Amino acid sequence: MISQLISHSISINKKLFTLLIDPDQHTTESLTNLSKNADESGVDLIFVGGSLLNNDIDKSFELIKKNTNIPALLFPGSLLQITNKADGILLLSLISGRNPDLLIGNHVIASARIKRSNLEVLPTGYILIEGGKSTSVEYMSNTKPIPAEKIDIAVATAMAGEMLGLKYIYLEAGSGAKTSINIKIIKGVKENISIPLIVGGGIKTPNDVKIAVNAGADIIVVGNVIEQNPEILPELVKACQNS
Ligand code: 1GP
């Protein structure tokens, strides 16, 4: 179970490094190479998803699973991105936004299919924070991110998510964000929730990883910079392990 892996890691104070893969950015060859690179670099988790979906998600999971034993979860950008080839699904409720489809509507539509799939479900409060530029998630979700300086609103949103029974909080600056999540927000949220904290968006360097981990992130998510420069992956994983 992925939830057990996460809670065990937290109990021994081990931070988890997650590679985010957008299948649309890959050919068979590049996805094979990236999966092998993830395996060799010591990546803990893989999230798979994107704003659009042109490539076959089943095939992407098959390729990932063939080349690595790392647990791979769906990080769905839409209802189309559900497959039982994954090990689990981050069932995201976009609690920073006020778009009812992304708070509950899509979940109602997908619930029977998710149940039939037997996927492990990780109920996640997804909180979008301004990251210095407009991002795909902001446009596609038709929601406004929480302003980066509104720490109190971000903290209250995360607390409300936990009170509603969500099991994970994901602070998201958006893929390719100019600035990653403000450490004051990470610290403030961490101090006020007791569920695992996932942080991603705009993390580009080993130092960015260290800053997020030291501020309180339990799970770091990195995607964009690895698409651009796959060689950086081992260094980023090491920074997460050694923080
Ligand atoms: C986006 O948090 C993830 O959903 C990762 O963001 O692609 O900027 O690393 P980047």
Image: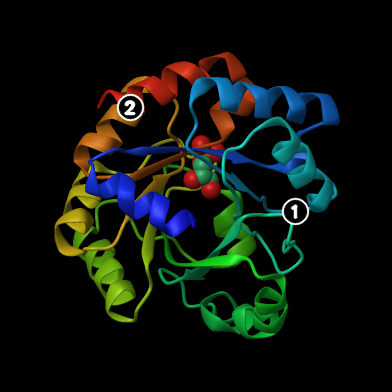
Q: Is the residue 101 above or below the residue 179 in the image?
A: below
Q: Residue furthest left?
A: 191
Q: Residues within 10 Å of mark 2 (few under 14, many from 20)?
A: some
Q: In x, y percent, where is residue 237?
A: 42, 25
Of 110 and 180, nearer the camera is 110
The residue labelled by disc 2 is 241
Label ID, residue 220: none
The residue labelled by disc 1 is 52
Q: CA distance from mark 1 to mark 2?
A: 32 Å
Q: In the picture provided, is 105 more to the left or to the right than 192?
A: right
The part of the image, by quadrant, that contains residue 141 is bottom right
Query: Comparing marks 1 and 2, which lies closer to the viewer?
Result: 2
Q: Is the residue 141 above or below the residue 73 in the image?
A: below
Q: In x, y percent, where is residue 220?
A: 40, 40
Q: Is the residue 12 above or below the residue 82 in the image?
A: above
Coloring scheme used: rainbow
On the question of residue 208 being in view, the answer is no
Q: Residues within 10 Å of mark 1 (few under 14, many from 20)?
A: some
Label 2, secondary structure: give it.
Answer: helix
On the question of residue 213 being in view, the answer is yes
Q: In x, y percent, where is residue 219?
A: 37, 44
Q: In x, y percent, where is residue 39?
A: 58, 26
Q: Residue furthest top?
A: 231
Q: Is the residue 173 above or below the residue 31 in the image?
A: below
Q: In the picture provided, is 58 more to the left or to the right than 79?
A: right
Label 1, secondary structure: give it.
Answer: loop
Q: Amino acid at mark 1?
A: Leu
Of 144 and 216, nearer the camera is 216
Residue at x-position 47% and y-position 64% = 144
Q: Closer to the N terminus: mark 1 or mark 2?
A: 1
The part of the image, by quadrant, that contains residue 65 is top right
